[in-house]
Image: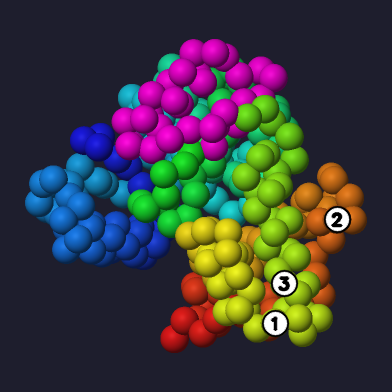
Amino acid sequence: AGATVTVVENGAAAAAAALDRVATGLKRAAERDRLTEPVEAVLARVSTVESVDKLPAEADLVVEAVPEASALKARVLAAAERAVSTTTVLASNTSSLSVTELAAALTRPGRFLGMHFFNPVPASDLVEIVVAPGTDAATVEAALQWTHCLGKKDVVVKDSPGFASSRLGVALGLEAIRMVEEGVAEPEAIDNAMSLGYKHPMGPLRLTDLVGLDVRLAIAEHLHATLGDRFAPPRLLREKVARGELGRKSGQGFYSWQ
C-alpha cells in the first residue's frame, strides 16, 4: 500500500526468517499479477529490528501479533508504547483476549484498540476493529483509514469475549472437531459440507489447521472460562496439540501438510 514497514522479531535469525517469508509472499503475489510494482521495490520499504524498543518513534501504527497470552501481549504493547510517539496508534491482533484488559497495561489507552486480521491475511478482506470503552474516536477513525488503505473491509465491534468473528468461528470449529471425535465423518467430508453446502471459502477443520490447533485451543480455553461450557475444548483437540499436531506449521493437523 506504499507504507514503510518495520517488522519486529526476537533476534537476528528470526528477523531474517521473517523477511524471507515476506519476500516469498511478494514473489507469489507477483506471479499471480497481484503486485503493481516490482518485488524489489516493495521489499525496499520493509526493514526488520530485533526488539520492540527499536521501533521507529515516528511510526503511525503499531500492530502487536505475538501469541495469545495476555501477559506477553501486555508486556509487548507497553514496550511499544514507550518506544513510539504519543500520537502513534497501538493495536492488538488478538482474536479473543480482552482489549480492555490489555489497555490497562498502557499509559495512553485512548490510543489503543483491537485490529483482528484474518488468515490468510494477504487474501482475506476482513479486519475486525475492536473498540474498548476507553478507546478514543480518533483512534477508531485512524484504524478504519488504515484498514481501507490496505484494501480491506471493516467490521466494528465492542470489546467482548471472542468479539464477533472468533466467537462464531470457534463455535463452528469446535463442533466440527467433536464430529470427527465422535466418528460422524472424516475431516474432508465435514469441510466439504460447509464449503459446498454453505459456500464457506474453507471448511472449519482446514481453517483450524491454517490458524494452528494450539492457537484455536488457547482461544477455546479463554472462551470456555468467560462464556461457559459451550466452548469447552474437545478431547481430540487437546490430544492433537499434546502430540505436536498443530496444523500446517507442524506438517500435520486434521490434514497432512507434508
Determine whether the residue tagged by mark 2 lies in a helix, strand or loop: helix
Task: Give, as a single range, the part of the protein colored magenta.
Answer: 128-156
Q: Residue at x 23, y 63 (%)?
A: 28
Indicate left or right for 128 with 228 as reference. left
User: Dividing the picture into quarters, in which one does residue 155 lie?
Assistant: top right
> Can residue 238 be seen here?
no
Q: How many C-alpha atoms fall within 10 Å of the one at disc 1: few (<14), some, or many (≥20)?
A: few
Residue 136 quadrant:
top right
Task: Check contact, mark 2 vs mark 3: CB within 8 A.
Answer: no
Marks 2 and 1, the one that precedes in the sequence: 1
User: Which mark, residue 185?
Assistant: 1
Q: Is residue 180 left or right of residue 75?
A: right
Quadrant for the N terminus in the image:
top left
Badge 2 amino acid = Arg
Look at label 3 and name its amino acid.
Answer: Ile
Residue linked to disc 3: 177
x, y percent for residue 218: 71, 58
Looking at the rendered structure, the kind of residue marked 1 is: Ala
- Residue 253 point in image, percent of width and height: 59, 78
As for residue 142 lying within the magenta part, the answer is: yes
- In space, the residues marked 2 and 1 are separated at their CA atoms by 21 Å
Mark 3 or mark 1, whichever is nearer to me: 1
Which residue is pictured at 45% across the width and 26% down the height?
143
Residue underneath mark 2: 230
Marks 3 and 1, Cα distance to the nearest angstrom?
10 Å
Q: Is residue 112 left or right of residue 145?
A: right
